[in-house]
Amino acid sequence: MLEDVWSVVPIKSMWPLTILEGILPLMSLKDVYPSITVGGLFRILILGIILWKIPRFVYRYSHFYRAAIRVQTIGPVHPLWGNLNLIKEVPDYFELIQQCVQKTRTRTYVTWITSLSHYFGVCHPETAKLLLKSSEPKPKGIGQGYRSFIPWLGDGLLLSEGAKWERNRRLLTPAFHFDILKSYVKTYNEVADILINKLLNASKSGKSIEIYELVGLATLDTMLRCSLSYDGNIQQKGDSHPYVRAVRRLTQLCLERTLKPWLFMDWMFILSPQGREFRRLINHVHAFADDIIERRRSNMSTSNTNTRKRLDFLDILLVSRDENGSGLSDRDIRAEVDTFLFEGHDTTASAVTWALYCCAKYPEEQEKIYQELTFLTDNNDYMGWDSIKGIDYLNLFIKETMRMYSPVPMIGRRLTKPVLVDNVLFPKDSVIEINISAMHHHPDVFPDHMEFRTDRFLDANVGDNDPFSFVPFSAGPRNCIGQNFAMNEQRVLIARVIRRFKIKLDPQHETKIFPEVVTRPQFGVRVILEEREPPSVFL
Ligand code: HEM
């Protein structure tokens, strides 16, 4: 099983194990040449590696260095630690970048990770679009952000590249066709029914409640129902459901690993307690998906009748064929399902949580949305397709929330060729952060960026804005394939909650938002929910 899980990790990264495998057979040489000790051989080997690696490193470093010194640093650079001594936790990093962008209005930046390594960053539509328009791959090398997800998400859309990505993106696009998305609206409402019941119970005491946890279960429930038609009472069971626990813990472990340099090497990670837990959870989530895929395939081959009324993502993945008539393998399908579950639940949960928080923080906005909802055609709480199309103000509100609190604050690319960015040639193999959050707060792009103003997104005001200035779902060929799905789900969940509750801030328990614009809502977003009287139009 170990081999199965890690087989997608590039073999180059396993070089310490490869060296060890090379040394072991040599040990028998001792019988032939008694004067060669194992220690001696090992020293020769290490020396060889150093002599081979150093010139290559110096050559590459000089290229990167020449570019890096021409770019704005995010803060004072320590001769040894670079900018690392300024960063204790992830929010510090985002805060430093925000401060730097606000102060210097820079469109690019560099972060020194010790004095020997660094990442470039782009934080303005003009510089970001150079990368967003390209199909440059995601950085998956040692210590780079996307690497920890490889054993879980395999070659799914998020991580794959080149011909494989192109083919699979083509095959998956029909799964997000308008007609398919329309059929999910009922599911969003069923999920909202359960969420609202839980919120009713949680709010009975009148005390504030932490909403991310409950919203996160709801969005995971949506993804499981829409991807696999799986309804395992997961909102009721929460973390006591092994699959829910596994997905949430895996997300956490992957993100944590990116901050722990001693776990960057795969073999170190595999041997660590976190790595062992990770492997166990991966085996669990893969077995869960494999089982459902296998049963669905065998059902399809034995009967033509589909008792379910609507297709889920799995149905579509199983029947999709490319121009040569070949479909996706079970392993490919599992990778895509896992990718949807990961990409589709945490992101939407962040977006919905922040939207509910903004309702509490800006009561006049909440009132406008509520008034709009009272004019909807549905005569009960249900949000049908026609209602979704008629909520113009809520749409503006969701956009402004995603600008203020970008659910995915940053994405990355690796350059396969040098690229000229603001007169600096970023060399091949550079790792570039595309800082969505900093772009959404750039003073030259969104003036008065900390003011919550829905009118920014009115057609009349969007006018000549660069289409790459507001990119919560990224943009270009690698944009989010699930954005319409996510927008519809957000509309239903937010509208249903606002129709039922008045949302208020808790004066006793201020939500700690530090730095305000980038903190993930996992750190605790609390609001007070008061049940509303049903308006006369609903009666
Ligand atoms: C508010 C919710 C969401 C936000 C803010 C969001 C944001 C993003 C962003 C920024 C990317 C680009 C990632 C990168 O370049 O590394 C992305 C990619 C992706 N998203 Fe989403 N996403 C959301 C919901 C969803 C949902 C619901 C699904 C699935 C149903 C989904 C599936 C994907 C996939 C498969 C990719 C990779 C696309 C590719 O590279 O071809 N996302 N998303």
Image: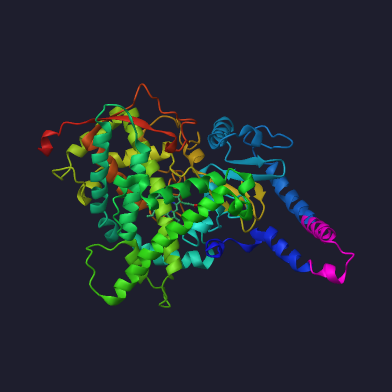
Residue 472 screen position, x and y as percent: 43, 45
Residue 419 screen position, x and y as percent: 62, 53
Residue extending farthest to the bottom is 324
Residue 257 screen position, x and y as percent: 56, 46
Magenta-tinted stretch: 27-53
Location of residue 108 (image quadrant): top right
The one nearer the camera, 482 or 191, is 191
Q: Is residue 501 visible?
A: yes
Horizontal side of residue 284 vs 397, given as left or right = right
Residue 436 screen position, x and y as percent: 49, 43
Residue at image location 38% in from the left, 31% down from the top: 452
Residue extending farthest to the right is 35
Height in image: 114 above or below 266?
A: above
Q: Is residue 177 visible?
A: no
Height in image: 355 above or below 417?
A: above
Q: How many labels sit on residues?
A: 0
Residue 322 is inside the magenta segment: no
Height in image: 204 above or below 335?
A: above
Considering the whole magenta stretch, tell me its main secondary structure. Answer: helix
The one nearer the camera, 529 or 424, is 529
Residue extending farthest to the left is 539
Residue 36 is inside the magenta segment: yes
The one nearer the camera, 272 or 31, is 31
Horizontal side of residue 202 vs 13, given as left or right = left
Horizontal side of residue 480 vs 199, given as left or right = right
Residue at image location 66% in from the left, 47% down from the top: 424
